[in-house]
Image (cartoon, helix red, strand yellow):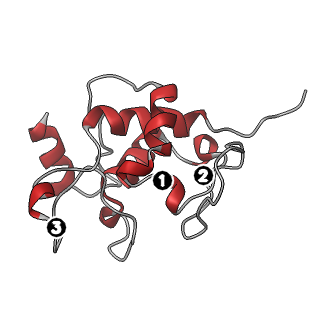
Amino acid sequence: MQRIIFLYFLVNLSLVPPLALAGSSGDPLKGEAVLRDMGRASCLICHKISNLLDEKDQGEIGPALDNAGDQFTASELRARIMDARQINPDSIMPPYFSTKGLHNVARAYQGQTIYSAEDVENVVAYLLSLKEETSQ
């Protein structure tokens, strides 16, 4: 597993999309719970998801995540969640599955990622479920 992640970061993102980290696709319900967890850098601090009406004070720093499933592939979402700096070195989005290049990390958290591999896959599954509803 670690070897796959290491090899992924050595190769250009456009050439080798990241593979599922947990060995299988995630659970969207668990992904929503992870995404809402304010104890672990919730995505909603910076992003907005309109259908989460019970979540007040959603962020506007990053783009809205509405329809993320229509706009991105699983690989694209996974890459952004793992470490958005690999796509945009100036990104202020925290790397949820990387410890590379971090500074002033509290000793208790050094060498630890914010999300586990399973968490990443669950959030990817949830974001993929966010699609524009079409009326028929």
**In the picture provided, is 119 more to the left or to the right than 77?**
left
Q: Residue at x 35, y 54 (%)?
A: 14
Q: Which amino acid does label 3 sit on?
A: Val
Q: Do the residues labelled 2 and 1 touch (CB within 8 Å)?
A: yes
Residue 76 at what x, y percent from top left? 43, 48
Residue 69 at what x, y percent from top left? 59, 40
Residue 5 at what x, y percent from top left? 18, 44
Q: Mark 1 points at which residue?
A: 43
Q: Mark 2 points at which residue?
A: 65
Q: Which of marks 1 and 3 is nearer the N terminus?
A: 1
Q: What residue type is labelled 1?
A: Cys
**In the picture provided, is 13 more to the left or to the right than 5?**
right
Where residue 19 sits, quadrant-wise, is top left
Q: Name the residue under label 3.
A: 105
The numbered mark at residue 125 is: none
Q: Which amino acid does label 2 sit on?
A: Leu
Measured Cα–Cα span from mark 2 to mark 1:
9 Å
Q: Residue at x 35, y 39 (%)?
A: 120
What quarter of the picture does the C terminus occupy?
top right
